């Protein structure tokens, strides 16, 4: 079992910045990939960025150069951060933290990011 606690998000004007964080606790030793997805109503949830156990990162094309994913590993928790800069209205979505394990995955509760034009 893994528990995910998300924080951050909110309302920002276009061109502004926001940060998200997700703290994972529990069976963190089994995490292979940890990252962020986002979803808007009527569309499928899409990958934003993730980081593998080894530190490799992947970004969806639309956020490259604007978003940065990073990670902090402590004794009993792993926290992944998403720093978002130069935000655009099309970045508006509910952002979900995700961890992938050999036997499944876990999702956070989601946090709203709204970018006004």
Image (cartoon, rainbow, N blue to C red):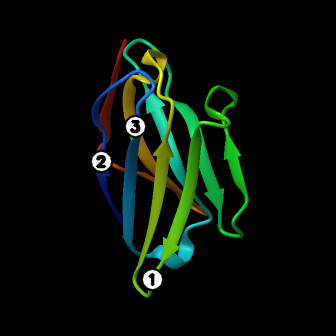
Snapshot quadrant of residue 106: bottom left
Picture residue at 39% right of the left edge, 47% below the top: 19
Identify the secondary structure beneath mark 3. Answer: strand
> Going from the N terminus, do you reach mark 2 or mark 1 first?
2
Decide: is 93 above or below 74. Answer: above
Q: Nearer the viewer, residue 88 or 60?
A: 88
Residue at the spot of label 3: 95
Image coordinates of residue 56 in percent, x first then y, are 73, 59
Residue at 31% of width from left, 53% of height from top?
6
- Where is mark 2, residue-wise? 8
Picture disc at residue 74: 1
- What residue is drawn where x is 49% and y is 28%? 45
Task: Name the quadrant of the N terminus.
Answer: bottom left
Query: Is label 1 in a helix, a strand or a loop?
Result: loop
- On the image, the x and y values in percent for residue 37 come to 50, 38
Residue 54's x, y, as percent? 71, 70
The answer for how far apart the CA atoms under marks 3 and 2 are is 10 Å
Q: Residue furthest front?
A: 15
Task: Classify 10 Å Cα crowding around label 1: few (below 14), some (14-19), many (20 and above).
Answer: few
Q: Position of residue 8 (x, y in %)?
A: 30, 47
- For the C terminus, which image quadrant? top left
Q: Earlier in the sequence, mark 1 or mark 3?
A: 1
Vertical arrangement, residue 78 with respect to residue 68, above or below: below
């Amino acid at each position: 079992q893994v528990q995910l606690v998300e924080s951050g998000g909110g309302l920002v004007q276009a061109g502004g910045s926001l940060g998200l964080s997700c703290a994972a606790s529990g069976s963190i030793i089994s995490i292979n990939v940890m990252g962020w997805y986002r979803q808007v109503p009527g569309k499928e949830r899409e990958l934003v960025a993730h980081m593998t156990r080894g530190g490799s990162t992947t970004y969806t094309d639309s956020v490259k150069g604007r978003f940065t994913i990073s990670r902090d590993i402590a004794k009993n928790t792993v926290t992944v951060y998403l720093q978002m800069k130069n935000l655009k209205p099309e970045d508006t979505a509910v952002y979900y933290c995700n961890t992938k394990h050999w036997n499944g995955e876990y999702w956070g509760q989601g946090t709203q990011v709204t970018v006004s034009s």
